[in-house]
Image (cartoon, rainbow, N blue to C red):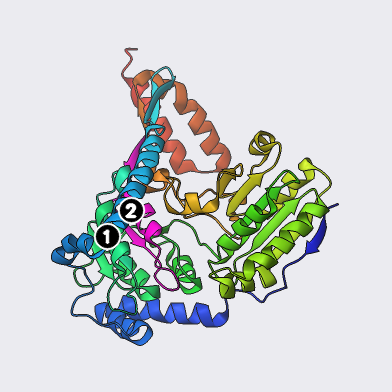
Amino acid sequence: MPTYLKRATPQPATVTGEIRDTVARILDDVERDGESAVRRWSERLDGWSPASFRVGDAERDAVGDRIDPELRGHIDDAIAQVRGFATAQRRTLVDLEVETLPGITLGHRHIPIGNVGSYSPGGRYPLVASSIMTVAVPKVAGVGRVAACAPPREEGGMHPPQLYAMHASGADEIYCFGGVQALAAMVFGIDGLEPVDLVVGPGNAYVAEAKRQVFGPVGIDLVAGPSEILVLADASADSELVAADLLGQAEHGPTSPAVLVTDSEEFAQAVVAAVDRWLETWPTADVAGAAWRDFGEVVVCGDHAEMAAVSDAYAPEHLEVQTRDDAWFEGALTNYGSLFVGPRATVAYGDKAIGVNHVLPTGRAARYTGGLWVGKFLKTLTFQRLTDEGVGRISPVVAAICDAEHMDGHAITARLRLDRLIGQVPA
């Protein structure tokens, strides 16, 4: 049985009645009053009420000159990596047409979603990478219209690198507003912003709850909670590196879980000591330290097999493997949002620029779903086509099943076709 050298402090539910009620109120206001409600909530929550929430073409075209040329080049490089991987993924999704029985042809087509809303957070951290991953990927999928948005910053307007990332990634429309009111504007539509069919992107607890509440009338990628990391490491790993990776992800927020799973108590103690040393100089120690204190866990297992079982039970968003047998873990693990294999890989690479998407399942949702990818922006639609031979083959089967289900109307539609086919044959 695994033992815990450190356990997370029990916490109350993250989605409170206050969050649910506030979200419902904002959604109702925007659905009823449109842009005037968006403006009221934007002014109240963000102190932001511009003449137009839409970012104009002139501002879009000029934003590249407002950021450091070296940073602009790095953003372009990240866009190229994300597009490249999404393009490779798209090539694996092929249309299908197959004759399953004589005269019966079945198949599917991958059709892009028509309209996508991309939300990028801009609160504690203006996530430039989110602006790339939720705009460039649907454009690779063939989505005709991507409307992107992010909240204003203290200096007024959107964070310039974030705006540049949206623009360079191919956003068709860009809006500067955030929070629940932004989700509502994209879902219900406001003046000049037509409703979307799917909303994607990370956000705080209010944004996540808004996505939960609007699901159905529109699609969503997933409902994500606080960002997570789990590191599987044995005594062969570098304790300083593992500690840094735990804190690096914990800086997302004070409720971000950071978990170490190992088969060596001595190594576990070394990582805990390294975390304490790092926190003396860690630039975001106020956030990462709180997350480690309240949500950090250290689990000691008997062997690699038990480590893998514990990890799969956690089903973490980000999973790093730093062991003497990384290849074995790569083949054995089944529940994670994204996997980072070996000491050279780190969550930051995947989060920012290496090409994989960083919109990933949290809260053990990796047990049943993966993260955002090019396939999320495609509908796989099936079709069927029959000849007379196919009708003769399948109608008796369908009619008999309909009879057994007491679905008499369905049975009639099947037998009518068979009767008409038989009627074509000379007596």
Can the viewer see residue 199 in this picture? Answer: no
Residue that badge 1 annotates = 164
* Amino acid tagged 2: Ile
At a point 33% along the width and 57% down the height, the residue shown is 197
Residue that protrudes farthest toward the top in the picture: 427
* Amino acid tagged 1: Tyr
Image quarter (top left, top right, bottom left or bottom right) of the C terminus? top left
Picture quadrant of residue 16? bottom right
426 with respect to 63 (left or right): right
Q: Nearer the viewer, residue 278 or 101?
A: 278
Category of crowding for the residue at label 1, using alpha-carbon neighbours closer than 10 angstroms: few (below 14), some (14–19), many (at least 20): many
Picture quadrant of residue 426? top left
| Sooner in the amino-acid sequence: mark 1 or mark 2 | 2
Residue 210's place in the image compared with 407, above or below, is below
122 with respect to 316 (left or right): left
How many tags in the picture? 2
**Tags 1 and 2 in contact by the CB under 8 Å rule?**
yes
Residue that badge 2 annotates = 75
